[in-house]
Amino acid sequence: MLSINLRGKTAFVVGIGDDKGFGWAIAKMLAEAGAKILVGTWAPVYKIFLMSLEQGKFDESRQLSDGSLLNFEKIYPIDAVYDTLDDVPEDIKENKRYKDLDGYVIADVLKSIQQSYGSIDILVHSLANAPEIQKPLLETSRKGYLAAISSSSYSFVSLLAHSAPIMSPGSAALSLTYIASERAIPGYGGGMSSAKAALESDTRVLAWEAGRRYGIRVNAISAGAASTRAARAIGFIEEMIQYSIANSPLAKAVTMEEVGHTAAFLCSPLASGITGVTLHVDQGLHIMGIAVDSPSLAK
Ligand SMILES: NC(=O)c1ccc[n+]([C@@H]2O[C@H](COP(=O)([O-])OP(=O)(O)OC[C@H]3O[C@@H](n4cnc5c(N)ncnc54)[C@H](O)[C@@H]3O)[C@@H](O)[C@H]2O)c1
């Protein structure tokens, strides 16, 4: 029987802060396929995530199909807007959420992974942030726009650049994007649409460069709307889910499992011929040219 087998592989999934996001769903499916999971959790939410995990708050979501619980080998605090310690401003170093944490910059996390595990086979980037997400692009400041690009796009470039030397040929990198990169989605502001467009372009360029230099595949999943913590910050996520149900060919909203399954496939040897692709997992919504529930179409 053909199945996804990731036994013996190590995955580093960056961007898990609770059990509701795509990062968690992807980590869970990679674990279902047998991979060992290392997690990168945003430094300011690291302690609360660890505490919730230890207190059993995620135990229901940790259930795997064989009856065991999803286990994280190690959880690293990380802030993916900083490559080296020199990049971290003094006020952040002194911030109470960062002060007791060590090695949360990208270079140090990867060094630490190399020391403990030697190598990784899968890198998943499931993070985004835009301080001005609720502002239309026309009202977005330069600072806000560049912050969105830094945390949502360049973070992937840097993570891959630092991971690639410890990834063997046949390894895979994956990021999460959204259709606002290709089509205008009013409300997805603050430069996040630009950041996703950059991320998708980088997926192609990095697929070429990392493919030739390291034999690594680089792909992106363009996911449909889902009610995660990051998505709720946008402000209209429930309406986008209803829109997908009303207008997508499959008349549904995307599920976490669907994105997790696709990620497991793309990161597995079954997808060995696929790189540089942005794959829509959105019930087909991206193919539509009209909103079929538009009042303009009512007879
Ligand atoms: N939810 C949706 O509707 C949707 C649709 C398409 C794509 N996506 C993308 O999926 C990815 C995951 O988001 P999600 O919706 O699952 O929400 P989420 O809130 O579960 O995940 C986002 C994570 O990014 C982390 N993060 C933010 N800034 C960071 C930084 N500087 N360094 C490290 N981590 C940082 C947050 O702590 C959080 O854990 C994002 O790239 C998002 O844009 C989401």
Image (cartoon, rainbow, N blue to C red):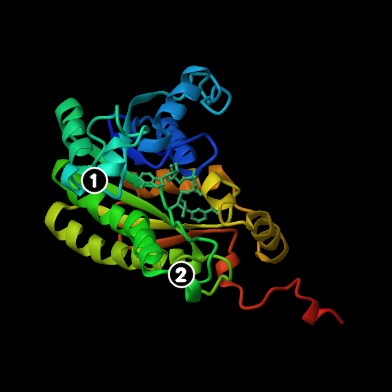
Q: Is residue 205 above or below residue 86?
A: below
Q: CA distance from mark 1 to mark 2?
A: 24 Å
Q: Position of residue 156 (x, y in %)?
A: 30, 53
For the question of whether residue 131 can be seen, the reply is: yes
Q: Position of residue 137 (x, y in %)?
A: 48, 72
Q: Report the front residue among 181 and 222.
A: 181
Work out whether mark 1 precedes mark 2 in sequence or the reverse, and give the earlier one: 1
Q: Amino acid at mark 1?
A: Val
User: Element type at marker 2?
Assistant: loop
What residue is at 44 percent from the left and 60 percent from the top?
A: 279
The crowding category of the residue bearing disc 1, from other C-alpha atoms within 10 Å (few below 14, some 14 to 19, many at least 20), is some
* Residue 192 occupies quadrant: bottom left
Q: Is residue 103 left or right of residue 12?
A: left
What residue is at 16 percent from the left and 41 percent from the top?
A: 166
Name the residue beneath numbered marker 2: 140
Q: Report the front residue among 16 and 62.
A: 16
Q: Report the front residue among 41 and 87.
A: 87
Q: Are marks 1 and 2 in contact (CB under 8 Å)?
A: no
Q: Is residue 16 left or right of residue 273?
A: right
Image quadrant where one finds the C terminus: bottom right
State the mark number for residue 96. none
Q: Position of residue 232 (x, y in %)?
A: 59, 50
Q: Position of residue 125 (x, y in %)?
A: 36, 48
What residue is at 24 percent from the left and 41 percent from the top?
A: 105
Q: Is residue 24 left or right of residue 74?
A: right
What residue is at 19 percent from the left and 57 percent from the top?
A: 210
Name the residue beneath numbered marker 1: 88
Q: Is residue 298 above or below residue 274?
A: below
Q: Amino acid at mark 2?
A: Thr
